[in-house]
Image (cartoon, helix red, strand yellow):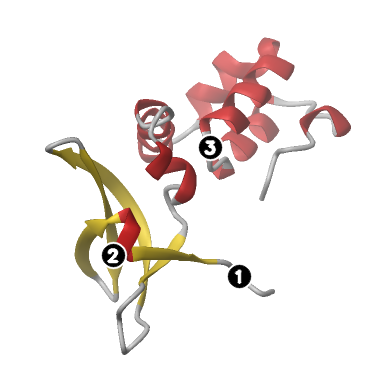
Amino acid sequence: MSTELVPDFEIDTAQQLAEYLAQAETWSEIERLTEAFKALKVEAWGLLSEEQQQHILKIKQWKDHEIAQIFPLGSTVQRRDDPEKKQGVVTDYWTAYDIDYVTFTVNGFTDWCQGKHLKRIYSTT
């Protein structure tokens, strides 16, 4: 779910805000939500699970890295040269020698590679 249209809808409870925060893919979405609904953000944070809070903190940590904007956490990716066209879900990022890498899970197995060797798969539904 995209929160690009934050000003066009109303959130009345901290629970609603927590649900939108948990679904956000980018730091800019999180910032827009917390800015638009400042009065609810502390309570909403408390309603998030530890896993959801860690997810948001990871988004914040990687907000200035282009790789996280191209391949948001939870997005579906596929290696460009994979003849089997296996798809995975982005779970993390890391850097080595000034190169950003994407970690993703494919059928329960963890894999990683440079972003230039991946493509994002968008749902057609």
Distance between mark 2 and mark 3 Cα atoms:
20 Å
Q: Which mark is residue 69?
A: none
Furthest residue toward top: 39
Secondary structure, mark 2, is strand
**Vertical relation: 110 (above or below) 10:** below
In the foreground, 86 or 39 = 86
Circle 1 residues within 10 Å: few <14, some 14–19, many ≥20 = few
> Which residue is the site of mark 1?
123
Residue 112 visible in the displayed image: yes
Q: Are marks 2 and 1 in contact (CB under 8 Å)?
A: no
Name the kind of residue labelled 1 in the image. Ser
Q: Is residue 37 visible?
A: no
Q: What residue type is labelled 2?
A: Thr
Q: Residue at x 47, y 57 (%)?
A: 75
Q: What element carries label 1?
A: loop
Q: Quadrant of the C terminus?
A: bottom right
Distance CA(mark 2)–CA(mark 1): 17 Å
Q: What x and y, as percent, mark residue 54?
A: 35, 33
Q: In this view, does 81 lie above or below 109?
A: below
Q: Distance between the residues labelled 3 and 1?
A: 18 Å
What residue would you read off at disc 2? 105
For label 3, the residue is 26
Specify whether 94 is left or right of 15: left
Q: What residue type is labelled 3?
A: Thr
Based on the displayed image, in which of its 4 quarters is residue 58 positioned? top left
Q: Which of 38 and 98 is in front in this view?
A: 98
